[in-house]
Image: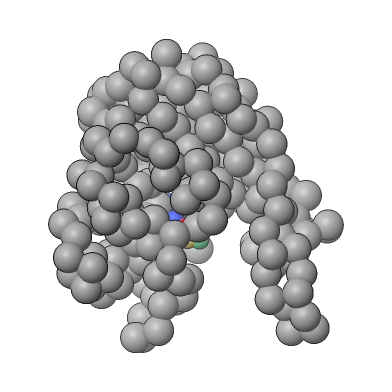
Amino acid sequence: MDAAGWDERYRGTELVWTAAPNRFVEGELAGLPAGRAVDVAAGEGRNAVWLGERGWDVDAVDFSAVALAAKAETLAAERGVQLRTHCTDLTAWDAPEAAYDLALIAYLQLPWPQVSQVLRLAATAVRSGGTLLLVGHDASNREHGFGGPQDPRVLYTAEQAAAEWRPYARILRAETVTRPVDGPEGPRTAIDSLVRAERL
Ligand SMILES: C[S@@+](CC[C@H](N)C(=O)[O-])C[C@H]1O[C@@H](n2cnc3c(N)ncnc32)[C@H](O)[C@@H]1O
C-alpha cells in the first residue's frame, strides 16, 4: 500500500491500532536506559509515545502524514510527550549514521528487498552498543496464525531479518513469538517474528 492508501486508512478519529505499546516492544525495551531512539514506520505512534513516556528522545518516521500529524502527535500531546515526526518514505530514508541508541521497527510489511534495505539503514543509524529491535508478522502467520497481511510477498521470518543484521550486530534473539488476538469466533493466536540485536 502506498502513502495515500495508508493516509486513507488512518483518516478518522479512531485509532487503527491501539494507544498501548506492542507487548514485545514493551517486554524487550522496558529495562533499557533511555537515550535517543528512532521508531521506523511509527504509524500512530503507540510505541514511540511509550518510549517518550519512559524518557526517550524519539524520532518517529513514517510516510503517512495523517498517521503522524493527526494521530501520533495528538497521542504524544495527550501524554505530555515530545515527539519529532518525519514524514518520509523509508525506501528513500536519509538515515543519520550512528545517531541513535535504539532503532525500533514494528510491523513494517513490505516486499523483502525494501525491508532488507530499511533493516540495513536502521542498523547503520544505531551507534555501537545500541539496540536494534524488529517485530513483524511472521511468514508462518498466514497459514498457522491469525490476522495480519495475507500477501506472502510482504511476510518474512526472524532468521531472514537476523541475517540482514548479522554483518552489523550481535543477534541476541531471532525467533517466532505468539500474541493472543480476538477473532470473530473467539480468541486466536498471531505469530510474529522478533529479532533483537546489539550493534557492533
Ligand atoms: C502496520 S503499521 C505499523 C505501525 C507501528 N509501527 C505500530 O506498530 O503500531 C505499518 C506502518 O508502516 C508505514 N509504512 C509502510 N510503508 C512505508 C514506507 N515505504 N515508508 C514509510 N512508512 C511506511 C505505514 O504508513 C504504517 O504506518
Residue at the outermost right position: 144
Tell whether 34 sits left or right of 7: left
Q: Residue furthest front?
A: 31
Q: Position of residue 162 (x, y in %)?
A: 60, 27
Q: How many marks?
A: 0
* Picture quadrant where residue 150 is located: bottom right
Here the colouring is one colour
Q: From where the camera sits, is residue 53 visible?
A: yes
Residue 75 location (% of width, % of height)? 27, 70
Residue 6: in sight, yes or no?
no
Q: Is residue 57 above or below residue 52?
A: above
Residue 38 image point, x, y percent: 31, 42
| Residue in the foreground of this view, choosing between 75 and 107 | 75
In percent of width and height, residue 2 lies at: 44, 62
Q: Residue 20, relative to residue 91: is it above or below?
A: below
Write down which quadrant ligand 1 falls in.
bottom left
User: Going by the image, does 161 lie left or right of 70?
Assistant: right
> Who's the residue at 42% across and 13% down the image?
200
The residue at the point 34 percent across, 17 percent down is 128
Q: Is residue 9 above or below residue 145?
A: below
Image point (48%, 37%), residue name? 133
Residue 99 lies left or right of residue 165; in this view the side is left
- At a point 48% along the width and 71% down the height, the residue shown is 17
Q: Nearer the viewer, residue 141 or 101?
A: 101
